[in-house]
Image (cartoon, rainbow, N blue to C red):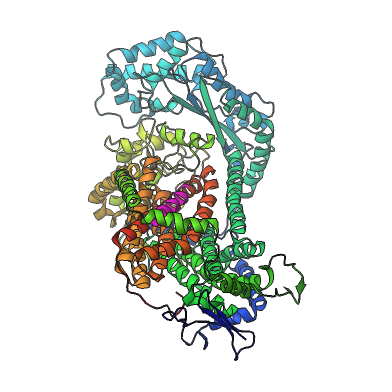
Amino acid sequence: MELSVVQTGLEKKRDPESEGRIVLTVSNEQNKEVAPQRPPPSFFTDQRGNLKFVNLVCAHPCKLFTAILTICLALTVLLGPFVFKQGNPFVTGGQYDMEDLRSSAYDSLRLARDEIEQIRDTAQAPQSATNLTRPQEETSQQLFWIFESETNDGVFGSRRSIESMKAAFDLFTTDPQFESFCKKDYEEIENGTTTSECAPILSPLNMYYASEWDADLVQTVIDELARDYPQNVLRYNFLGVCVEFDVFCPPFVNDEDFEWAVALNENITRITDTWDGKGELNSDVGKVTLFAGYMNDLNTKRGLINFGFDKGFNITNLKSTYSRGIVFWGGPLDGRDIVGTYNGTERRKDDVFLKRYIVDTFLQDMKKIASEDFDPEINSYFFSGSIILEVLFDIVQRDASLALFSFLFVCVYIRISLGSSFLAFVGLLEIGLSIPVAWFVFSVCFRIKYFSVLNTLALFIVAAIGADDIFIFMDAYKQSATPSPEEAYILESLESRMSWVYRRSGSAMAITSATTCLAFLCTLATPLSGVRSFGIFAALVVFVDYVLVMTMFCTAVVIYHNKFEKDGCCPCFVGGCCKTAEPSPTVKALENVRLNGSDVERGMISKFFGTKLSAFILNPVYRLLVAIIFIAWLIVASIFATKLEPTKNTEQFLDENHSLQKSFTILGNEFNAAENDRGLEIFFTWGLGNVNRKGTNLLLNPDFFGTPVFLDTFEFDEQCQLHMVQACDDLKAKKSYAPFIKQTNGLGTVKCFMEEFGAYAAIGNLGNCDAVKNGAWKETNWMVPPDRFSSTMKEFLEQPSCYDDRNATVLSFYKNELGWDGTDLKYAGISIENSILDPYSSKAEMVAREQYDAMIKISEEFDARMEKSCGSKVIMTDLDENFTFMNNQRIYVRSAVFSSLLGIAIAFSVLLLSTRLFHIALLATLSISCVLISVIGVMVMIGWELGNVESILISVVAGFSVDYVVHLAHSYERAVGDTNTRIKNTFWEMGISVMNGMITSVGASIPLFFCQLQFFSKFGTFLCTILAFSWVFANFAFMAVLAQLKMPIAEKRSICGT
């Protein structure tokens, strides 16, 4: 039978060679210049130009869908034993540049220490522990209270605010069970017995609530220090260390000055000995604060008060806006003794009891005190190791629910857009399976073991890109129902229709996926393994998602076409599949074309893009308006973008308004390092060379960092020993070093095993710790010659250290400084505590670098004096990765710029290769560049600085911003006709697809705005900003420029539906 369709010039024929196949040709009467353009036969296509893979899909959709799903599920199941065999699959170590001198120094000492400990433990037989830990003698945990004044008078400016702070601590100390959990101080009494009591709260409130207060004596001390101020303060500081500790005494001291200093020290000691917090609130709080101000001026007394007063407090400013205090919890609990070290299982067991006690007894009252309406004069914040995990777990749960809401939005929007629950389910299934399948390829096939925490961002990346690919594929499928006259042949069969859909959507998605993958792979330019792992994994996820869309989702669309597309199809399954609908949707589409031609009514949104928006872009007046708006915005954004600077503050982990983050911020920024604070330990070590990095590749083996190098030239002879003691003295007392070393009792905080080794060599034991500490032994011939060194060292290491409160052995106390392997001293070191950096947080790069440069200068001074005598240069490092992280911050900034520019260059190259049109590739690349400038400008506008998170996000801007402009550019290049026609066709074809992708991604990012974890909050803001700008620049700026330039494109016949 032959039917001529006059309205469209189409003819409908039965293919005599294939039963049921319908062939459309073009009537020469109506449209002689148009002829169907079928793809030629090839290795991938049959004689009719249909893709052989698509023929297979159309012939066996259910079988192929089941097979693909089975393979994906099997890979997901097989993934478990590979990545979860060690428990936590994430790797957190090794986040530094392996070739950098900071990381080399860090691993040189760390690996050497670990190897020496292993050798020593292997060589020595296990010894039974002899030290006894008495009940609650160890500090198991600490609970912090942080206070912030709401008045100009400061936290100690009124009796009311002082009483409010005291109430926070009385909450614990007045509880009947407190003595069963507090940290206890033990005191030896007569007949070898001991007594104990709870350690006092560490707080300046102890002086305001002193059990005794001699007002006249206090006034006497104040008058002495105020007289000829600051001369008497300087006078005491000159003599204080000598008077109090009998060390570093000046060679010439005036007797009158010395006696005056002794008398002043005795008076101050009488006053401070009663600071126990057991009395009533002092009637003259102003006098107490004034006394504290003068104590803050005295180097050896500053440690008594500076813990609880902020960095702005001094004798000329007696107002402290902030204060803090600590409650000490003890262990072991339950009245039991522990033989050996109190850690591991015993400590964890006590942590459970302590947490239950605090949560059940105090938590509600603590929250009440910390509430805003408890006291209008003061804000209170608290945190403790026993409950901080509980708080963080609540935060993670809340943020996880927001992330789930993001995925729920994606699910709902895909369902609404596709109009099919089946396709929406399969779409979400393939998006979800992209993660484990990519993970399998990443870990099992590529053998990459470094799985970074950053890789979790791939969930949001694939949700955005995967949804976009689904919309592109489905919109191509819907458009295939209304082909143009020259492509009418596609409705002759389902195979030809799906081949057309496969080619059209596949080519567009291939370009965007390739560009996105390559943009993520730009992170390989960074030396940081965590970022490189993220780039590789994200690229694999994008690639796997593309493959699953073109396979699993393609088969699902065929099943949908055969079973569910027909209105009212009942899911009656026969042989595992719903009964095939007759007539098929393709046949019905053919009938629509026969009746209406290609002018089938389209959706309202498609019509808006194809008519309204295209008309807006094609109007010269509106284009001028668009140009003015975009140029003005880019000028403003560029100005702000140039103001982006590396962060000068410690980066925040939580939202700045969260009480826990406020606590961290106040502790990190508002207090100087006090004697009770732990500073960052920095080590100066002799005897080690730079670590040997041969064979290291953290991506493939994240546990191997190289092998330590012990220098054969290292000699710890008498001259080296003497120089090392002199180095210790310099670190303690040299004025030029003091700003960088935490001061304790007026001296630098230094761990120097040579002080005890020299005393042991001179005295023969460490029984008299006063004799060890006063340094009188330095006047003797204490140096140990090489022939006696080994035997002396073995005996010395078993001695209890005079500098450890628990009398730990020398070997245990100096485990990081002493490289004794049982027979030889492989390395020797000194450590100091830094006055600015701490082991709990990472300061901004400029802050850490100032301290690092100072330590390097000290190292150079040591080398000039000691390299020849010790046979080794000194290696300076910390073991808490502060200095390696300092370098990371610089790498983040450098990588952000380099990776973003490289990503833009890659986008240009892919566009040029795919379109073969220089001006389209250039304009699309300029659009991506404008997005980058806009995003950076907005970051500055909302107050962001260039920290670690921001740097990582900027480095992947090109990967996120390329999709929309590439889809439009590819569609424009593929269209036929003049510029205006191409623009209309581009909006008709891709407008709704690009918009759906944008809405899905932006909608999914909005819930992340409200996350408490700053990484996800910033990621959500970044994702929303970049996608919104990408859509705006692609649809308005890019298309408007094309309309304005009207650069001709040579006509070419489509031979493959693209």
143 lies above or below 890: above
Quadrant holding the N terminus: bottom right
Residue at the image point whose x is 32% and y is 74% from the top? 1050
Residue extending farthest to the left is: 864
Question: Magenta segment range?
Answer: 1021-1035
Say whether residue 895 is visible. Answer: no
Q: Position of residue 901 (x, y in %)?
A: 32, 59
Residue 165 x %, y %: 54, 22
* Direction from residue 122 to residue 748 in the image, left or right: left
**Toward the viewer: 947 or 590?**
590
Report the magenta stretch's main SS: helix
Query: x%, y% of residue 75?
Result: 61, 71
Q: Compare residues 110 and 81 and report the one nearer the observer.
A: 81
With 283 as the anchor, is 939 left or right in this view?
left
Magenta stretch: includes residue 943: no
Is residue 1024 on the magenta stretch?
yes
Residue at image location 28% in from the left, 36% down from the top: 734
Where residue 781 sits: x, y (%)? 31, 44
Give the answer, above or below, for where 125 lies relative to 945: below
Q: Quadrant of residue 742?
A: top left
